[in-house]
Amino acid sequence: MPFPLIATLALLFLTVAFSLQNDQTVSITFFKWTFEGSLVLVLLTTLCLGIVIHILASMPARIRKSKEIAELNKRVMELEGAQQSDVSRAQRHDTSYTN
């Protein structure tokens, strides 16, 4: 069995075991709102919100890095083009002496 499949099955098993052991009803108060629900749903919702917040908070850095990578790739292409033209000029220069 490949490792990703084993890891996914283990994670699924742990999630189901966690859900079955934490089925109590809890009350959540946020300012004036009160919510009641299963403990596992509250915890998984909090986890998902944390993941979304992390992704949103890291977006500016990801965008900045992707722009920098694009600029560096463009510069590499320019330098490779300049190097190729120098090589072709040198080859033409060498062949002009042999004629």
Image (tube, rainbow, N blue to C red):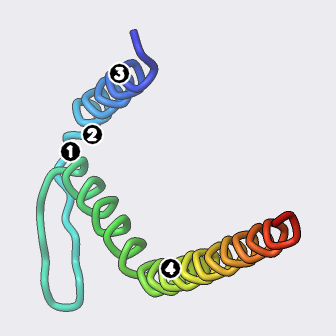
Instruction: Work out which residue is located at the far bottom of the displayed protein and give it.
Output: 32
Dot in front, 3 or 1: 3
| SS for dot 1 | loop
Gap in Å between the C-alphas at discs 1 and 2? 6 Å
| For marks 2 and 4 on the same chain, the one whose residue lies earlier in the sequence | 2
Q: Do the residues under discs 4 and 1 have CB atoms within 8 angstroms?
A: no
Quadrant of res 27: bottom left
Q: Residues within 10 Å of mark 2 (few under 14, many from 20)?
A: few
Direction from residue 7 to residue 17 in the image, left or right:
left
Direction from residue 50 to residue 20 in the image, left or right:
left
| For marks 2 and 3 on the same chain, the one whose residue lies earlier in the sequence | 3
Q: Residues within 10 Å of mark 4 (few under 14, many from 20)?
A: few
According to the picture, the residue beneath numbered tag 2 turns out to be: 22
| SS for dot 4 | helix
Say which residue appears at 77% left-offset and 67% top-offset: 91
| For marks 3 and 1 on the same chain, the one whose residue lies earlier in the sequence | 3
Direction from residue 13 to residue 81 in the image, left or right:
right
Gap in Å between the C-alphas at discs 2 and 4? 48 Å
The relative height of residue 90 versus residue 51 in the rendered view (above or below) is below
| For marks 4 and 1 on the same chain, the one whose residue lies earlier in the sequence | 1
Instruction: Work out which residue is located at the far top of the displayed protein and give it.
Output: 1
**Which numbered disc covers residue 24?**
1
Say which residue appears at 32% left-offset and 22% top-offset: 9
Q: Amino acid at mark 4?
A: Ala
| SS for dot 3 | helix
Q: Nearer the viewer, residue 17 or 4?
A: 4
Gap in Å between the C-alphas at discs 3 and 1? 31 Å
Q: Do the residues under discs 2 and 4 have CB atoms within 8 angstroms?
A: no
Say which residue appears at 35% left-offset and 21% top-offset: 5
**Which numbered disc covers residue 95?**
none
How far from the left and from the top, in percent, is residue 93? 81, 75
Gap in Å between the C-alphas at discs 4 and 1? 51 Å
